[in-house]
Amino acid sequence: MLTRKQHELLIFIDRHLKSTGFSPSFEEMKEALQLKSKSGIHRLISALEERGFLRRRHHRARALEVVRLPDTGAPRGAVEAPPAGAGGLAAPASVSPPAGFSPPAGFAPNVIRGDFTARLQGVRSANEAGAVQLPLYGRIAAGLPIEALRDNGTHIEVPMAILGSGEHFALEVAGESMIDAGILDGDTVIIRKGETAETGQIVVALVDDTEVTLKRLRRRGNSIALEPANPAFETRIVPADRVKVQGRLVALLRRY
């Protein structure tokens, strides 16, 4: 099942590939879908990868491959937007391709109505499936270290099935330094509290008792390397006695 934006992006990428022979840039995709930031494109591409519609060829620029298209001309479960003035809502603007791009003649994507009021068989509510309230400590930079924001008054509901033993907390990610690890700006990461981690694990690290960052930990002798998952960012190497592990990543939540 694809959302309307996922379907629009998939069709746009497919038409661009067939017309030019290469995938569109993130800027072109952002403009075509009329999104405000590229992080929204990252989320859509990751969702299409997870669902088996797109494949990303790593270590190559602008290398997206359409694996398959939806069975129908529209995303299943999509709902038509009301016309302007209906209930005070305006219909969303159509997707505008970049300058110089001409889609093949006869291309006219549609949407189909879906009934979201009916309860899906086999799907349980959070309470029925079992959920717990975890403290949401604040916004952690995955690009540059920031001081942790520990607001114990904010909580987030998390299914128990994704948690193991131990104590957990949640943090909201800011920045794009971990995008190659599938962690995007605006994601919520679930962290299992602990002071130890194996090399290669993604951890919340406290540096000099003031700065907190989400990075992949590598041990290098008496030093700790805090590695980003984005070649645009540099690895930070810090003496081991200046780094305290606060916990390690065990799950990730994302809203579309």
Image (cartoon, rainbow, N blue to C red):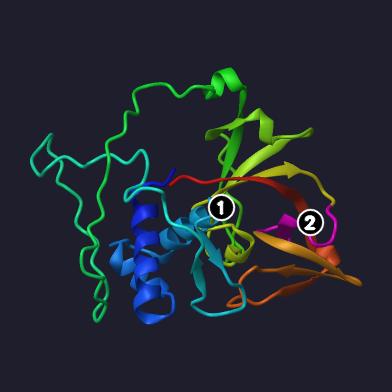
The numbered disc on residue 50 is 1
Q: Position of residue 123 (x, y in %)?
A: 52, 25
Q: Residue furthest top?
A: 128
From the viewer's perspective, tell me whether residue 85 is left or right of residue 49: left
Q: Is residue 216 magenta?
A: no
| Residue at disc 1, secondary structure | helix
Q: Position of residue 253 (x, y in %)?
A: 56, 44
Q: Position of residue 67 (x, y in %)?
A: 51, 62
**Residue visible at 77% across and 57% down?**
201
**Residue visible at 34% across and 23% down?**
117
Q: Amino acid at mark 2?
A: Lys
Q: Which residues are magenta?
A: 197-211
Mark 1 to mark 2 CA distance (whole Å): 33 Å
From the viewer's perspective, tell me whether residue 37 is left or right of residue 243: left
Could you say which is closer to the camera, residue 86 or residue 163? 86
**Residue visible at 16% across and 47% down?**
91
Dot 2 corresponds to which residue?
Answer: 244
